[in-house]
Amino acid sequence: MKSRSAWAEPYKIKMVELLQMTTPAHRKKVIAEAGYNTFLLRSKDVYIDLLTDSGTSAMSDVQWAGMMRGDEAYAGSENFYHLEKTVQEIYGYKYLVPTHQGRGAEHLLSTILIKKGDIIPGNMYFTTTRLHQELAGGQFRDVIIDEAHDPDSDHPFKGNVDLAKLEALIRKHGPEKIPYVCIATTVNMAGGQPISLANLKEVRELTSRHGIRIIHDMTRVAENAYFIQQREPGYRRKSIARIVREICDLTDGATMSAKKDALVNIGGFLALNDWDTFEEARNLVVVYEGLHTYGGLAGRDMEAMAIGIRESVNQHHMHARVGQVEYLGHNLQAAGIPVVRPIGSHGVFLNASAFLPHLSQDAFPAQTLAAELYRDAGIRTMERGIVSAGRDPKTGAHRYPKLELVRLTIPRRVYTQAHMDVIAESVMRVYDRRHRIKGLRMVYEPKYLRFFQARFEPLG
Ligand SMILES: *Cc1c(COP(=O)(O)O)cnc(C)c1O
């Protein structure tokens, strides 16, 4: 066993939120009412909520104290200037446009930079990011290394870009058709996998040669920096803050969902280094989000974000955060449960194709498994497979992703090690009866981001 002091929680608990206990009969009823979609469950029916790490973190007492210092002026709030200064200092980007969350920033950026027919390469797609690129008339192209699509590959940096794939795209379409390359830290859809600094430097070198921007999807940049510190030669002695800064300095701008790394329940921003794009974004934000000094947020939200950004780059915080996720992942691996390797930063990803090999992808194995996990012990997880991948906008056919996963996402600073053990036990119970699990069929499918609201019925 690894020494417990290696990652014991670097905080103590000041206030608690009581959990709801439910019965098997109740869970069977409500998951059917929810159309076997965990997004449609009510949270009062959930015992341990691993749906997402987005906006579900516990804020510190310092952040809560910051909330009381909210300056709710319509224009020129003090909290905006604190946030702007923090972003400049910690991340190094020059100009800041606050938005209500990450997709608000994606919307502004895609609207400004993408023209019809453009190509946007990225290290794997993200649901909202790709949709905004498509709605702006562009097309996403995956340039991540092949290992990222293989759940059993132990590559330490599965978020890396395959430079040959990127170079081939530039040669085929020409740099004028590529407004930017989107680089995510860490790569959510690959299982929370990091990109290395060595690889990012090569991407920078290649894109600079062709005059192409790098836009950083920096949602989990501190978690990515932690993996660099632990795995990449030459970074063991560098602080997370220093590595975060080195990553950001290699890019031209960023979209941020502060609901993840930055430890707040709502918030995000667009950060840019070039004045012209910033000026357009600062103008466009007033149409969709709010004035450029609040962008859809209350002053208190911006204050909590500024404090959370600083807490996110703390070594002890990140050690405990990733340590807890790895603890759960390694326990599941030891029990023979098929999980994506290496264990990612924000959750453990079950390989539903290997968990339920008797189900074809058309029977929605990951959606099925998420529903079964809920039924077993009231643990809410989510699908990251064929439902999340959606349909090809041209052909209208399902996209069949190589990864068919269930995400057990761990909120930051919320659950204890005992909860991790309860989760592992439940997954093992479902694994023991996996052969009896039947698939689902989709009976309602919304047009956009269907995984949020689609409904299913049991097959057979
Ligand atoms: C969550 C997320 C987003 C979108 O952010 P929201 O705050 O949910 O709108 C974009 N990219 C990645 C990688 C994410 O995880």
Image: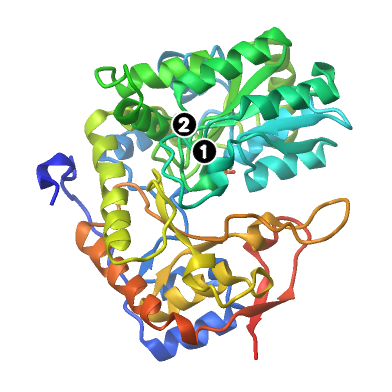
Judge whether residue 100 can be spotted in this image.
no
| Disc 1 residue: CB within 8 Å of ligand 1 | no
Residue at point 37%, 48% (across, down): 343
Q: Quadrant of ligand 1?
A: top right
Between 220 and 345, the residue placed more toward the observer is 345
The tag on residue 267 is 1
Judge left or right: residue 243 versus residue 76. Answer: left
Is residue 222 rendered to the left or right of residue 135? left
- In this rendered view, identify the residue nearer to me: 318 or 280: 318
Q: Position of residue 323 (x, y in %)?
A: 26, 45
**Could you tell me which residue is drawn at 74 percent across and 40 percent down?**
132
Above or below — where is 149 with respect to 219?
below
Q: Which mark is residue 302?
A: 2
Q: Residue at x 32, y 40 (%)?
A: 64
User: Mark 1 falls on what kind of element?
Assistant: loop
Kindly identify the amino acid type of the residue bearing the numbered disc 1. Gly
- Quarter of the rendering containing residue 297: top right
Counting the numbered discs, the total is 2
10 Å crowding of disc 1: few (<14), some (14-19), many (20+): many
- The quadrant of the rendering that contains the C terminus is bottom right
145 and 277: which is toward the camera: 145
Q: Position of residue 161 (x, y in %)?
A: 58, 29
Tell me the SS state at disc 2: helix
State if disc 2 and disc 1 touch (CB < 8 Å). yes
Residue 385 versus residue 432 in the image, above or below? above
Identify residue type, mark 2. Met
CA–CA distance between discs 1 and 2? 7 Å
Label 2: how many residues lie within 10 Å, few (<14), some (14-19) or many (20+)?
A: many
> In the image, residue 226 lies at what x, y percent?
34, 31
